[in-house]
Image (spheres, helix red, strand yellow):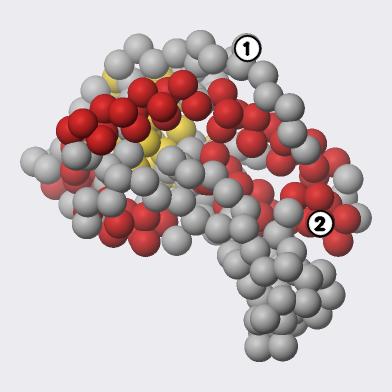
Amino acid sequence: VLKAGLSAAASGILFWGFDIAGFAGPLPTLDLYRRATQMACFCPIMQWHSEPDGGQFRDLMPGAEGNNERSPWNMAQIYNAPEFLDEMRYWHKLHEQLRPYLWETAKRCVKESKPILRPLVYEWPEDSNVLCCQDEYLLGNDLLVAPLLEENAHSREVYLPQGTWTDFFSGDIYMGNQTILIDAGDKLPVFTRNGFQRKHDGYTCNYF
């Protein structure tokens, strides 16, 4: 999925998103759903969109028996994990808190004909370390995202290009031009630059 997003950006597509947990077929595990939701939180478009129960692909997908609709509440019910719903609320609300940043970024990207989600090589074409980097991306100018793409993974290496980077969640500061090992726990590695602040934490929204 991430490679598709980076390819779309390289093709000049400004807005991009994906269906969290896929559109049809067997339900993913809770951890894969969690990781997909976390990545979607830091994408221009965050959505879950899936075949309804009894949809057209039901008989074509092995293991798709039962309700394979991808809503957070169906996942919580199927896996008998009511606490999972609160966890998913956190990421959806965080995406809403990013809305002012995404809105300003979208306006600027339309004006400048730049993709909102972009590969690192787009920003640092002279840095040989990012030429083959296919598992990190920029969201706008100020957020670097390194999603956890494997089930039950909690840590990964992250390459930070030139500059000063601040961990979005912990506030730890790192200098660029180095690869670091990040233990993200139940979150994902995200870094900010250019004095980005989580100044929209007071933004509220009401849904599920």
Q: Nearer the viewer, residue 186 or 194?
A: 194
Q: Is residue 129 at least partly visible in the picture?
A: no
Which residue type does callout 2 highlight? Answer: Asn
Please give left or right for residue 116 compared with residue 89 in the image.
left
Question: Which residue was labeled with disc 1?
Answer: 202
User: 38 above or below 36?
Assistant: above
Answer few, some or many: residues within 10 Å of disc 1's Cα (few below 14, many 20 plus, some between 14 and 19).
few
The x and y percentages for residue 66 are 84, 75
**Which mark is first along the chain, 2 or 1?**
2
Q: Residue at x 36, y 23 (%)?
A: 104
Q: Residue at x 65, y 63 (%)?
A: 50
Instruction: Report helix, strand or loop for mark 2.
Output: helix
User: 173 above or below 129?
Assistant: above
Please give left or right for residue 195 compared with residue 111 in the image.
right
The N terminus appears in which quarter of the rendering? bottom left
Q: Nearer the viewer, residue 36 or 126?
A: 36
Give the CA distance from mark 1 to mark 2: 29 Å
The C terminus appears in which quarter of the rendering? top right
The x and y percentages for residue 175 are 30, 22
Q: Residue at x 73, y 68 (%)?
A: 52
The x and y percentages for residue 118 are 29, 44
| Residue 7 placement: quadrant | bottom left
Q: Residue furthest left?
A: 126
Answer few, some or many: residues within 10 Å of disc 2's Cα (few below 14, many 20 plus, some between 14 and 19).
some
Which residue type does callout 1 highlight? Answer: Gly
Q: Which mark is residue 74?
A: 2
Please give left or right for residue 44 compared with residue 62 in the image.
left
Instruction: Report helix, strand or loop for mark 1.
Output: loop
